[in-house]
Image (spheres, rainbow, N blue to C red):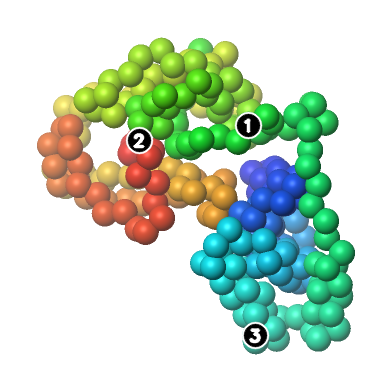
Amino acid sequence: MTAYVEAAKWYHRAADQGSWGAQFNLGVDYDQGHGVSKNKVEAYKWYNIASANGEDNEHDHVGALCRNAMVKLKEITPEDVAEAQRLSAAFVSRKETPDSSSDNPISGESPKATGTGFFISENGFLITCAHVIEGASKVRLVTSAGTIDAKVVQVDAANDLALLKSDGIPRGGTPLPIAASRSAHLGGTVATIGFPDPSLQGFSPKVLAHGHHGGNRHWEVELRPGDDSRSPKM
């Protein structure tokens, strides 16, 4: 629940600044009561704003689809629809300067690439995919405790892995235990964990489980559309 509340807080900030993904996710949060109290007027409002602010026709359609579904399923009254439309029309996005908030997790330039990483030690070492940080001039980690800087320590291009280092693990974090590859057996369970396209699917981790069909270095897994191919599969 804490993660939903934290995510909703940053969705609000990004939505106020005009982010389509945050506006849509905020609609979902109010629609389903994730991190905020259920509020169909607010849900409709943010779906409506996201629909008008979509980056392309597909994004426009998603916001409108969710908004219209609320009406079709009679989840919102005509009076509340009118109020939500009034609030939508009154909405004006605002830009936040990098120094306007001391706890702003994403300030300055927008990231050029994103991917999932895993802490593997208490002193801040973590791994991600090499192509995620390829050509990067700066690496920042978005965690439940805020955003922290990291530096690239080593890159293994052959296995598409990169070792990063930050100043320790955020409070409450736990490093991922690493097991020897020889402990993996044919038919064992392989879990893929990551944060695919958080602007659309939110900040909660997505988990898929599969059987182990390959050798110790190559694993055959079937990803759903939208799953993050830019994340190491653990």
Give the mark, 1 or 2, whose residue is nearer the N terminus.
Answer: 1
Q: Where on the picture, by quarter, is residue 44?
A: bottom right
Instruction: Identify the residue under disc 1.
Output: 109
Q: Residue at the spot x=83%, y=60% of the render?
A: 91
Instruction: Identify the residue under disc 2.
Output: 232
Disc 3 versus disc 2: distance between alpha carbons? 40 Å
Q: Is residue 117 visible to us here?
A: yes
Q: Is residue 177 visible to us here?
A: no
Which disc number belongs to residue 73?
Answer: 3
Q: Amino acid at mark 1?
A: Glu
Label 2 secondary element: loop
Q: Where on the picture, by quarter, is residue 29?
A: bottom right
Q: Residue at the spot x=77%, y=60% of the render?
A: 37
Q: Position of residue 42 (x, y in %)?
A: 78, 66
Label 1 secondary element: loop
- The residue furthest front is 56
Question: Disc 1 or disc 2, which is closer to the eye?
Answer: 1
Asked if the residue under mark 2 is in contact with the one under mark 3, i.e. CB atoms within 8 Å, the reply is: no
Q: Amino acid at mark 3?
A: Leu
Along the viewing direction, whichever of 5 and 199 lies nearer the viewer = 199
Q: Position of residue 61 (x, y in %)?
A: 56, 71
